[in-house]
């Protein structure tokens, strides 16, 4: 009986923190999905709701001379306006390999992505999100990505979705 009580006490000490971590990860993943669903629907309200009020964006890429460049944005407004504009071909960002790490009210997520305009491949790279936990839930406060058009290893299932 004593062993059962010890096991129960240990279980009660371990399971709630694990459940909370899983809940936080699910919420973080949901915010990322909300962003991409909003982009696909050209829904600027949904896209904006994934972000914290104080957000920065950055892109690492190579220019035509193959020099490494860093482009930073201190405002998310241009991004939201761009992805929130209705167009003939929807914006599709497919992600895979999502890894989420969390420490208290801070989290980061890293994933590979492929970006399509309609069914046409545009570019691929990595998205790196940083989150803060607010009273309204987890919000993106920094989003950085890489962009390239070559050396993209896109899963077959994703490629198949965009074949004409």
Image (cartoon, rainbow, N blue to C red):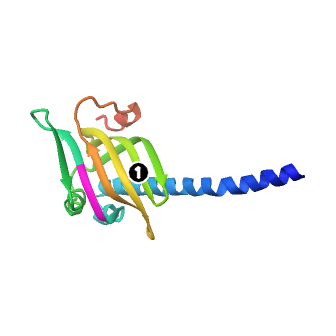
Looking at the rendered image, the quarter that the C terminus falls into is top left
The relative height of residue 134 versus residue 71 in the rendered view (above or below) is: below
Give whichever of 10, 76 is nearer the camera. Answer: 10
Establish if 73 lies above or below 121: below
Q: Residue at x 20, y 56 (%)?
A: 73
Range of the magenta residues? 54-58
Q: Residue at x 41, y 57 (%)?
A: 31
On screen, residue 14 versus residue 132, left or right, reads right
Q: Which residue is mark 1?
A: 108
**At 29% across and 49% down in the image, what residue appears?**
144
Q: Position of residue 60 (x, y in %)?
A: 22, 43
Residue 7, image x, y percentages: 79, 50
* Depicted 45 relative to depicted 67: above or below: below
Q: Residue 57 lies in magenta, yes or no?
A: yes
Q: How many marks?
A: 1
In the displayed orientation, state which residue is furthest to the left.
Answer: 65
Q: Residues within 10 Å of mark 1 (few under 14, many from 20)?
A: some
Residue 162 image offset from top left, x and y in percent: 32, 38
Name the chief secondary structure element in magenta: strand
Q: Which residue is the extreme one toward the right?
A: 1
Residue 19 drawn in magenta: no
Q: Quadrant of residue 67?
A: top left
Q: Which corner quadrant of the image does residue 62 belong to? A: top left
Asked if residue 121 lies left or right of residue 11, the reply is: left
The picture places residue 38, in percent across and down from the top left corner, at 33, 58
What residue appears at the point 45 percent right and 55 percent down from the top-left corner?
A: 28
For label 1, the SS is: strand
**In this picture, residue 25 sits left or right of residue 57:** right
């Amino acid at each position: 009986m004593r062993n059962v009580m010890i096991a129960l006490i240990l279980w009660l000490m371990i399971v709630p923190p694990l459940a909370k971590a899983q809940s936080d990860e699910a919420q973080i993943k949901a915010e990322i999905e909300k962003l991409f669903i909003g982009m696909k629907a050209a829904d600027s309200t949904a896209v904006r709701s994934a972000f914290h009020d104080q957000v920065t964006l950055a892109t690492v890429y190579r220019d035509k001379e193959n020099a490494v460049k860093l482009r930073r944005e201190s405002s998310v407004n241009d991004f939201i306006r761009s992805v929130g504009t209705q167009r003939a071909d929807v914006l599709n960002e497919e992600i895979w390999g999502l890894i989420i790490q969390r420490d208290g009210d801070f989290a980061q997520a890293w994933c590979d992505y492929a970006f399509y305009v309609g069914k046409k491949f545009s570019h691929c790279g990595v998205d790196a999100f940083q989150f803060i936990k607010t009273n309204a839930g987890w919000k993106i406060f920094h989003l950085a990505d890489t962009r390239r058009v070559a050396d993209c290893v896109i899963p077959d299932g994703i490629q198949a979705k965009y074949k004409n």
